[in-house]
Image (spheres, rainbow, N blue to C red):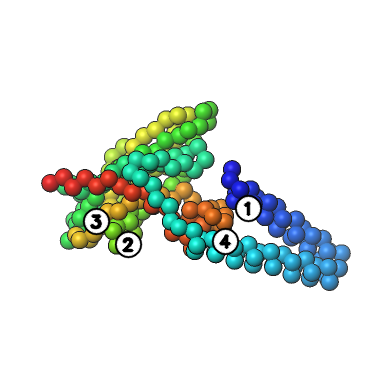
Amino acid sequence: MTIADLFFLVSVLFVFGMTAGIAGSALRRRWKAAGRLCLFLGLFVALYAAVGVCVALARPRRFYAPGERRCFDDWCVAAVGIEPAFDSPCGADLGGRTWIATIEVSSVARRVHQRARDAGAELEDDRGSRYRPCAGPAAGNSLSDMLGPGESFRVRVPFRLPPAATPAGLIVHHGDFPGLVIIGEDHSFLHQPALHRLAVNRRP
């Protein structure tokens, strides 16, 4: 657990405590006390949001090298590589080109089985445009499959890009909350999400 995670948990407890205090004051018809608590709570939330936005805008984007593993607690992921698909799983290309990205999912847990039900990936090209998968996994596993302790598997995800676009990397999602509101997180509000660079195989 990082300092940012700890500060977020303390902030959540503080907000719940203040909310309980406001409710208690209102039930006892102590309107002035309830008003002061509401003002204090509003100021705290506004300050937290302002700090979160400033950190998100000032903090540089994080990049991961091809094959470098990134962990969300015990669930880890690495972008291995990408190559053009000749037998496209996305149907007619309509002037575009289909690429297959290979992602390795692994677990560093020692005892528990786990899965990331809300895991997903987007492909970013060299111009900064982003694309969602044009179909389900090309074969085998999906990002949300169950993992045993220490297990790993690979997922092949298809994306369709314009003819002139070159794949740059993957953006891996592991659920928006609570990371969206944790100060300093890679996927916090207004911060550029981390990019997993891909080894591009331009086989003929």
Which class describes the residues within 10 Å of circle 3: few (<14), some (14-19), or many (20+)?
some
Q: Amino acid type of disc 3?
A: Thr
Between disc 1 and disc 4, whose residue precedes? Answer: 1
- CB under 8 Å between callouts 2 and 4? no
Q: Is residue 114 above or below residue 135?
A: above
Query: Regarding mark 4 in the picture, which secondary structure is present there?
Result: helix
Between disc 3 and disc 1, whose residue precedes? Answer: 1
Residue located beneath label 2 in the image: 129
Position of 129 with respect to 32 (left or right) is: left
Residue located beneath label 4 in the image: 52
Query: Regarding mark 3 in the picture, which secondary structure is present there?
Result: loop
Between disc 2 and disc 3, whose residue precedes? Answer: 2
Residue located beneath label 1 in the image: 8
Gap between marks 4 and 3 measured at Cα: 33 Å
- CB under 8 Å between callouts 3 and 1? no
Q: Is residue 150 visible?
A: yes
Residue 168, position in %: x, y? 30, 53
Q: Nearer the viewer, mark 2 or mark 4?
A: 4
Residue located beneath label 3 in the image: 166
Which class describes the residues within 10 Å of circle 1: few (<14), some (14-19), or many (20+)?
some
Name the residue at 51% across, 57% down. 188
Name the residue at 27% across, 45% down. 199
- Single out the residue that lies furthest toward the left: 204
Q: Identify the disc placed on residue 62.
A: none
